[in-house]
Image: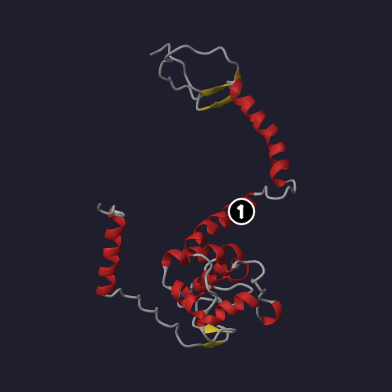
Amino acid sequence: MGNNPKNQDGVEQEPIVGEIPDDPLTGHAYDGIQEFDNPLPGWWKWMFIGSILFAFPYAAFYHGGGEGRTATERYDKALAENIRLQFAEIGELKMDRATVVKFLNEPNWLRVGKSVFKTNCVSCHGAEGGGLVGPNLTDEAYKNVKDIGDILHVLENGAAGGAMPAWKTRLSPNELVLAASYVASLRGTEVADGKPAEGRVIPPWPEAPPEEETSDEEANTDDETDDAASTGPKKAST
């Protein structure tokens, strides 16, 4: 024990285990522990230098003003392509009150309307519809809407002397209809930080139309048609 090294307070330390490297000391010491000047490995230094050099062409390519290169523009393009693929499933929607009511009650398509809203409307109405420059869409009062069909009209043609822009030249009919349905779905959600109510309270939205039921006779006819299609045409007997 008497030959063990001592710290700066003269207290004997545990014996050193292993080989002491030949690296120079930094001159820092704490509680008798001295710090070796171990250099960073070469591969780490070159990666660091390479990342700095890579940053210049990266910034020039993605932030140099080239059209369609920024992350936002590429996201908007991908979103638009995805929406077009989804719209192929439903075709071109009729821009009327009944269609807005129909898709108000279809959650899968409301998510598409939400995407349209998040891309184009949050700067005025907030991410949750609570209102910023534009009015709160989550309460029961409305400034330019007396019926659910008016939401589509406002989206198409704008309102308040241009404060609400007309979107009919910027969005497709399907986007307008689904965005109108999504805006209608925000009613009554009452976000915590929403603007005070503006306008007047209007009657509630209409109920969803009942789903069409297929009669037993029609179902039997469909079954017979399916059976005929599955067996295929029969050859005439000779």
Above or below, 213 against 123 in this view is below
- Quadrant of the rendered structure where residue 211 is? bottom left
Dot 1 crowding, Cα within 10 Å, few <14, some 14–19, many 20+: few
Q: How is the image coloured?
A: secondary structure
Residue positioned 51% across, 61% down in the render: 87
* Amino acid type at mark 1: Lys
Residue positioned 43% across, 11% down in the render: 3
* Residue closer to the observer: 40 or 118: 118
Count of picture labels: 1
State whether residue 162 appears in this view: yes
* Residue closer to the observer: 77 or 160: 77
The secondary element bearing badge 1 is classed as helix
Above or below, 170 against 102 in this view is above
Q: Position of residue 31 (x, y in %)?
A: 50, 27
Above or below, 57 against 119 in this view is above
* Residue closer to the observer: 182 or 36: 182
State whether residue 40 appears in this view: no
Q: Is residue 62 left or right of residue 182?
A: right
Residue positioned 53% across, 78% down in the render: 96
Residue positioned 53% across, 76% down in the render: 137
The residue labelled by disc 1 is 77
Q: Is residue 163 left or right of residue 212?
A: right
Q: Position of residue 105 (x, y in %)?
A: 41, 72
Q: Position of residue 233 (x, y in %)?
A: 31, 55
Q: Quadrant of the N terminus?
A: top left
Q: Position of residue 5 (x, y in %)?
A: 46, 16
* Residue closer to the observer: 216 or 5: 216
